[in-house]
Amino acid sequence: MTWLLTGGAGYIGAHVLRALQDAGRDVVVVDDLSTGVRPRVPDGVPLVSIDLGDSAALAQVFGDHSVTGVVHLAAKKAVGESVERPIWYYRQNVDRILTLVETMANAGTRNMVYSSSAAVYGMPAGEQVAEDEATAPLSPYGETKLIGEWVVRDAARVHGLSWTALRYFNVAGAGSDDLGDTSAFNLIPLIFRAVAAGDRPKIFGDDYETPDGTCVRDYIHVSDLAEAHVIAALATEGSSPIARAYNVGRGVGSSVREVVDMASDVIGRDVNAEVVPRRAGDPAYLVASAERIRDELGWQPTRDLRDMVASAYSASTA
Ligand code: UFG
């Protein structure tokens, strides 16, 4: 069984790569290295640096490596950037999944795990959001992720794919010091970046209708997320039915203030965060119902917020 891992030189992809290897699967990585970095791919794992939109080059990879399944992570993922450059986001995220699924169909590759996002839900009303809740993305980024789910769903019907989408909540932490998130788009890396620069981390608003006034999110350790990919990939290889989408979160909400306090605790001094005005488009509360993946696939996260913050800090100072 050889799995093609798109985006395998990225922060999340590098963790998924190791988890697939631990499960005894051969892996070939396709990554255009626009944000991924080569050293994240271990020696001995083929890394093909092509644009996923290049169907001829992609077809060659499927043939050369006898690819049996695809874990598709490669995408642009900055919400704010997607609002500024919507057409480019559609090109990057939608065009490329079309090419990928078409190439899979031509090659007879039947298994797929697609990286989706909690961004497909937009601003849900309830406490915990379940997979069958209405989807209403608030950004082109979230829209491209949802369209990707539709593309795979519709292709699956005619090409007989066995597939699922994993809807990630807030991914954080590092499985080892060399695999940290270097992009600094998200809260936890931004806290440590500010501290390293001698600046004050920012809290975007403390006047939300949440217990301490700051936004609540469901943080999930990247190593737990990586294990979810493996469980999903193996499930597509089996004969049991598999759902179209699984939330990957812990079902535990943490506020921005709680994350900041945890960072102070891990560092051993107050990070001295300052409250600034709200950031546009932030839902007050976004927490997963994580029951479906636990009940149907047996996935159980084992790392908590302290593990995420401590491992992210360790990687940022290594
Ligand atoms: N935040 C701050 N200060 C910062 C950065 C973030 O207070 O310097 C706050 C945000 O306002 C938000 C929370 O911290 O309330 C988390 O923000 P992130 O930017 O880390 O993450 P988001 O929840 O906005 O987005 C994440 C992923 C997206 C994905 C989304 C799904 O980054 O890719 O979850 O809900 F779409």
Image (cartoon, rainbow, N blue to C red):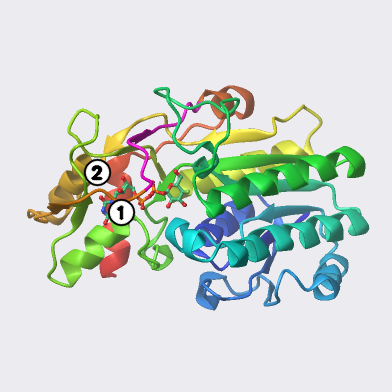
Q: Are marks 2 and 1 in contact (CB under 8 Å)?
A: yes
Q: Which residues are magenta?
A: 281-290
Determine the secondary structure under disc 1.
helix
Q: Residue 220 is drawn in which quadrant?
A: top left
Q: Is residue 279 left or right of residue 88?
A: left
| Pointer 1 residue Cβ closer than 8 Å to ligand 1 | yes
Residue 288, located in which quarter of the rendered image? top left
Circle 1 Cα neighbour tier, 10 Å, few/some/many (<14 / 14–19 / ≥20): some
> What's the amino acid at mark 1?
Leu
- List x then y, in percent, for residue 259: 23, 45
Which residue carries the number 2 mark?
256
Lateral position of residue 70 relative to residue 35, left or right: right
Does residue 113 appear in the picture of this structure? yes
Q: Which mark is residue 187?
A: 1
The residue sitting at 88% across, 67% down in the picture is: 63
**Quadrant position of the C terminus in the picture:** bottom left
Query: Residue at image x 35%, y 56%?
Result: 186
Q: Amino acid at mark 2?
A: Val
Whole-angstrom CA distance, mark 2 to mark 1, is 8 Å
Asked whether mark 2 lies closer than 8 Å to ligand 1, one says: yes
- Residue 7 visible in the current orientation: no
Estimate the x, y position of residue 178 in percent, counting from the top left: 40, 68
Judge the density around disc 2: few (<14), some (14-19), many (≥20) Cα neighbours within 10 Å: many
